[in-house]
Amino acid sequence: MELVLIVCLLLAYVLIWTIVAVFRVSEPKNLPPGPTRLPIIGNLHLLGDQPHRSLAKLAEIHGPIMSLKLGHITTVVISSADATKEVIQNHDIAFSARHVPDAVNAHNHANHSVVFLPASTEWRTLRRILNTNIFSNNSLEAKQHLRSQKVEELIAYCRKASLSNDYVCISRAAFRTTLNLLSNTIFSKDLVDPYEDSGKEFKEVIESIMNESGKINVVDYFPVLKKIDPHGIRRRMTHHIGKIVEIFDELVEERLQIRSKQDDVLDVCLKIIQENPNEINLKYIKSLFLDLFVAGTDTSSSTVEWAMTEVLRNPRILTKAKGELEQVIGKGKIVKEDDISRLPYLSCIVKETLRLHTPIVFSSTISTTFSGSITW
């Protein structure tokens, strides 16, 4: 019995050190310093439930550039401003590719998303659509009346709730406003009723996509488990993204049937597809719309909700903000976009809200491969 136990222990010892040796041989030799790694899991045990804080503490020990082994993935963590600037500005081409979480492979989204596509013809076309029709100065100025209209609808909804002694859910109200602003920019129509407490289901789907995308997924560290999907994250993401894609399919089909020119983003996209069918197709366009709706709705409503929460927690700040509005704008008047530069205190409240409650992840990951040597 003792002999069997000794043999089992020896075999386990040999197996563990074989795995360690394989990992050491397969990884680069010129990595920056980092913490000691365990077999198989590497440094995953050091991340904890707040990875950004854990990485900050590790950086204090191992320096602003350190290497970690997260499961099967060799990772270099850069946490200093100077090093980050060097990577982003001077070596942006080498570090341009994004690491693709397994969750966004649902509906094959990652292969058509402007966020995750490598620099390619399709990526450049999607970027051109964004820069020309949404983010350019001319587009922003052309849509100023639309933004003002949506803000007025939001104020009208809040006034209606006040007169009927009803409560206002800040996050849903802000979500409806940004959702309809985006939908009018892209499809020239509201997706939800701006004067009613609607859009709850759409908001829940967007929030579910954000939540599933942000969850720790063991597949991202052990790609061999991809087919198993142990957490069920990709399966749930497929369901959530499918709901949004169904809405896009209906809107695109409706436009193709009526064949009316709306001079919006959808028209531009359909024209590009018609003129260059080999360059881009509807899958890329629907993924682009999904990126816009996920990035542009939940983040904005979350920021507004947190800003309102913080000023209500701090009556002194609320009083100063109201005083600035009454002095610069006038009591009962609506704030216009041109007034923002004259409201420095309100602008500081928004910036501080973004600092305290960032609507995006604390860290981003990029994927790159080097054939030469690197000096750390």
Image (spheres, grey):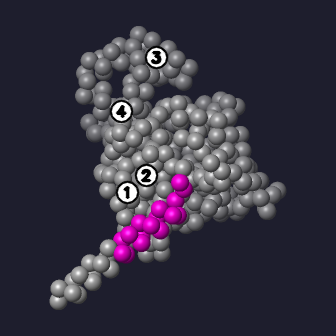
Q: Nearer the viewer, residue 184 or 208?
A: 208
- Secondary structure at badge 1 equals loop
Residue 125 visible in the picture? yes
Q: Is residue 312 above or below residue 320?
A: below
**Circle 3 sits on which residue?**
343
The magenta segment is: 14-29
Badge 1 amino acid: Arg
**Cα–Cα span, label 4 and label 1:** 33 Å
**Cα–Cα span, label 4 and label 2:** 27 Å
- Secondary structure at badge 2 equals strand
- Numbered disc in front, either 1 or 3: 1
Pointer 1 or 2: first along the chain? 1
**Circle 2 sits on which residue?**
68
- Image quadrant holding the C terminus, namely top right
Q: Nearer the viewer, residue 264 or 35?
A: 35
Q: Residues within 10 Å of mark 4 (few under 14, many from 20)?
A: few
**Circle 1 sits on which residue?**
37
Badge 3 amino acid: Leu
Badge 4 amino acid: Leu
**Does the residue at mark 3 contact the one at mark 4 (Cβ under 8 Å)?**
no
**Cα–Cα span, label 2 and label 3:** 45 Å
**Cα–Cα span, label 1 and label 3:** 51 Å
